[in-house]
Image: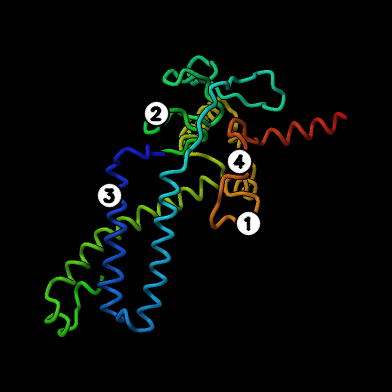
Amino acid sequence: MKDRSSFSVPVTVVVLAILYIYLSTVFIFIERWFGLMSSPGVFNAVVFTFIALMCVFTYSVSVFTDPGRVPATYAPDIEDSENPIHEIKRKGGDLRYCQKCSHFKPPRAHHCRVCKRCVLRMVLLVGSLTIDPPKDELQSGDSFRTAYIISGLLLVPLCVALGVLLGWHIYLILHNKTTIEYHEGVRAMWLAEKGGNVYTHPYDLGAYENLTTVLGPNILSWVCPTSKHIDSGLRFQTAYDNLIGASTSKGS
């Protein structure tokens, strides 16, 4: 989450890009193709405006929503039987401790340089250009072509980048991983194979359980997910919980 009072160049660039794409699409392309006063023009303008508002809303939520913080009183309890997993440092094997925040890190928490504190469960890491009707060429000159080129230069990289990010985050959600955990898992998998073992991500509960963990238990809320189903963020259900529960039930 960015500080509300600070100026962010990336956020400003994204907002200006969204504004330009919206204005050029509605008042240049839709106006030119259908006419804003026609029924198809009004329909396309309304639909695109709705999509643009949803885009602005979701982006605003991602920027201004607090990602969570580690309580000052948090301390790991290695004797807690309900929490079988305790993340340790790569070197030394000690419990993870943030030198910058001066407190222990809960599972899946990492220090964010932007927020300047530890964050819980941090996720980081044309055809019309070549053929134009002669009448439009005479009336508009090169203004429409310039708008096409600028919009294309903005939309093509954005669509490619957002498409890749969408696919990447779908993969992460289905496996209940963060970007950091993915890269750490690659190293852990390599070390496990080197030792003749098999590495399994401890927070991978299965595709559907992973979806409900991230998006919520109510499927209807997946379109606009909230964080009401998330507890304190200091402990997460693991695949080992089911194993412990099964062994306990057998023993009883």
CA–CA distance between discs 4 and 3? Answer: 32 Å
Which amino acid, by three-letter code, is at mark 3?
Answer: Val
Specify which label sits upstream in the sequence, 1 or 2: 2
Q: Which residue is mark 2?
A: 116
**With 207 as the anchor, is 47 left or right in this view?**
left
- Label 4: which secondary element: loop
Mark 2 Cα shell of 10 Å, populated few (<14), some (14-19), many (≥20): few
**Discs 3/1, front:** 3
Lower sequence index among marks 4 and 3: 3
Question: Which quadrant is home to the N terminus?
Answer: top left
- Tell me how far mark 4 sits from mark 1, CA to CA: 15 Å
Residue that badge 1 annotates: 219
| Residue 224, position as x, y percentages in the image | 53, 55
Residue hosting label 3:
13
Residue drawn at the location 41% of the way across and 44% of the way down: 63
Whole-angstrom CA distance, mark 4 to mark 2, is: 23 Å
First in residue order: circle 4 vs circle 2:
2
- The amino acid sitting under disc 2 is Lys
Give whichever of discs 3 and 1 has the lower sequence position. 3
- Tell which of 192 and 60 is nearer to you: 60
Q: Is residue 67 depicted above or below 251 in this figure?
A: below
Residue 116: percent from the left, percent from the top?
39, 28
Residue topped by disc 4 = 230
